[in-house]
Amino acid sequence: MRYLHTMVRVRDLDASLRFYCDLLGLEEVSRSESPQGRFTLVFLCAPGDRDLARERRAPTVELTYNWDPEDYQGGRNFGHLAYAVDDIYAACQRLQAGGVTISRPPRDGRMAFVRSPDGISIELLQAGPALATAEPWASMPNVGAW
């Protein structure tokens, strides 16, 4: 058995690609459109998984955009996506500068949570040992659900 992908339905493909690619740092691996099914599939990968994702389309996140409007109700039953990052403080700063709320700041230099435009919880974990605690992160409170 091997992990393939996680599928996330999105309401606004452009807003979701801005979040996942421009701010979070994922890369688009492939895209397909199904006029008869009225949907677009976009597969994304972490930069460190690029070669494997292009070869196997895994490990990836599949964004499913249905062309007909739907209201998706997110919930904690989905859980979250998790990514290791080289510098958790830099990743959170980039996301925050892009207008993303840091729901659970990286107070411990190791873990943070943010949410996508569709309310999907994203866990960011420091690759390797935790970074030394640093402001403003160390004194920031949690915001909303994570």
Image (spheres, helix red, strand yellow):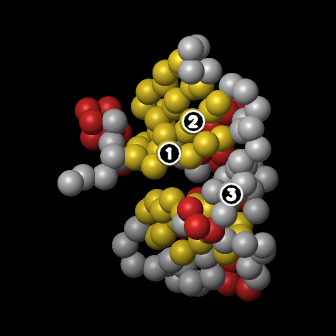
| CA separation in Å, label 2 and label 3 | 14 Å
Mark 3 secondary-structure assignment: loop
Q: Is residue 50 left or right of residue 44?
A: left
Asked if residue 138 is positioned above or below residue 101 in the image, the reply reads: below
Picture coordinates of residue 84, whole percent (x, y): 44, 62
Task: Tell me, yes or no, whether the two marked residues, 2 and 1, touch with CB atoms within 8 Å.
Answer: yes
Please tell me which residue lies in front, 103 or 109: 103
Mark 2 packing: few (<14 Cα in 10 Å), some, or many (20+)? some
Q: Which of disc 3 and disc 1 is earlier in sequence?
A: 1
Q: Residue at x 62, y 32 (%)?
A: 65
In the orientation shown, which residue stands out farthest toward the left?
A: 1
Crowding near the residue tagged with mark 1, few <14, some 14–19, many ≥20 C-alpha atoms within 10 Å: some
Residue annotated with mark 3? 74
The quarter of the picture where the N terminus appears is bottom left
Q: Position of residue 113 (x, y in %)?
A: 62, 68
Residue 91 drawn above or below residue 31: below
Q: Nearer the viewer, residue 139 or 38?
A: 38
Asked whether residue 50 appears in the rendered view, the answer is yes
Residue beneath disc 1: 7
Can residue 90 be seen by looking at this rendering?
no
> Label 2, on which residue?
64
Residue 31 lies, with reference to residue 98, above or below; the image says above
Of mark 2 and mark 1, the one earlier in the sequence is 1
Residue 56: horizontal and vertical position, in percent? 27, 36
Q: Name which residue type carries label 3.
A: Gly
Q: Position of residue 68 (x, y in %)?
A: 73, 27
Q: Amino acid at mark 1?
A: Met
